[in-house]
Amino acid sequence: MATAREDAYQTIRNSILAGEFEPGHQLKELDLVRICRVSRTPVRQAIRALADEGLVSIKANHRTYVSEVDETLFEQNFDVLSMLESYSAGLAAERISKTEIEFLKELNEKMAGLNSDDEKDVSRRYIDLNSEFHRVIHCASGNDRLRDIVLRLVDFPNTIFLRFGKINIQHNPQATAQHNQIIAALEDGDREWAAMQMKMHTESVRRSFKVLWLASKDA
């Protein structure tokens, strides 16, 4: 049975991703208490979890807003992801279990099988599966400090989705193919190859998102 914190988290998250709260919108605690039908404590816990995902930003004055992203932040986050995700994948190659490998395969098959005429729906479902895929790898790294840092960034595509209402789904088949290469390197226990495959994948995703930025400028 879901807890009050989990209910609040899902309600707020779904509202943000559905566009009911747009980027820059202030999330007022009393409004969220009313919407989620829970007390303040679960709402505060949910907000902290959403901040860790990058969906909301908590300012110095303690006010909370739906996250906004510009090109500078986009590049900075991918610079960090490119370095840390590859290192983490290399560590995971030496530690990941067969059960985790099989779960990665299942997740990637689900991503490859997504099919809908609704681009927004496919984007949301792909983002969630992709996030879980990367989380499995980073949790297998064995480095708790690194894991905590990387997991705060792997959901960054959510903020891209908030800005554009979609991801570049044309890149999805290429991304799932790259996932297969990462899985193969992890399965072989090849640290250097896993790190290299993850770095190439991260940079490929960066380029795919740049397509959305360029399209927004031309619109």
Image (cartoon, helix red, strand yellow):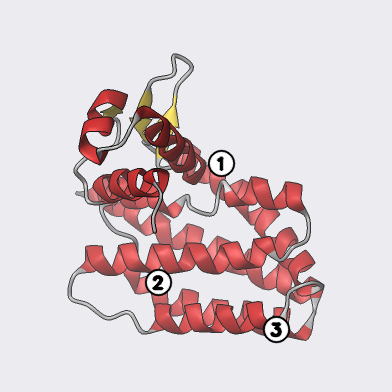
- Say whether residue 213 is visible: no
Circle 3 packing at 10 Å, graded few (<14), some (14-19), many (20+), is: few
Q: Position of residue 147 (x, y in %)?
A: 68, 53
Where is mark 1, residue-wise?
Answer: 76
Gap between marks 1 and 3 measured at Cα? 34 Å
Which of the numbered marks, if any, corresponds to residue 63?
none
Which three-letter amino acid code belongs to the residue tagged 3? Answer: Lys
The total of numbered circles placed on residues is 3
Q: Nearer the viewer, residue 129 or 73?
A: 129
Badge 2, how many Cα within 10 Å: few under 14, some, many 20+?
Answer: some
Give yes or no for contact between labels 1 and 3 (Cβ–Cβ under 8 Å): no
* Mark 2 or 3, nearer chain start: 3
Q: Looking at the picture, which amino acid does disc 2 mark?
A: His
Q: Nearer the viewer, residue 86 or 37?
A: 37
Q: Which of pointers 2 and 3 indicates the residue nearer the eye? A: 3
Spatial distance from mark 1 to mark 2, Cα to Cα?
Answer: 21 Å
Counting from the top left corner in percent of width and height, residue 85 is at: 66, 58
Q: Residue 8: x percent and y percent? A: 34, 43
Q: Residues within 10 Å of mark 1 (few under 14, many from 20)?
A: few
Q: Would residue 27 appear left or right of 81 to someone viewing this image?
A: left
For the point 74% across and 63% down, the residue is 141
Where residue 19 appears, as percent x and y from the top left, is 21, 46
Q: Is residue 72 above or below residue 94?
A: above
Above/below status of 50 relative to 136:
above
Residue 46 lies, with reference to residue 176, above or below; the image says above
Q: Nearer the viewer, mark 1 or mark 3?
A: 3
Image-quadrant location for residue 116: bottom left
Q: Element at badge 3?
A: helix
Q: Which residue is mark 2?
A: 171
Q: Secondary structure at mark 1?
A: helix
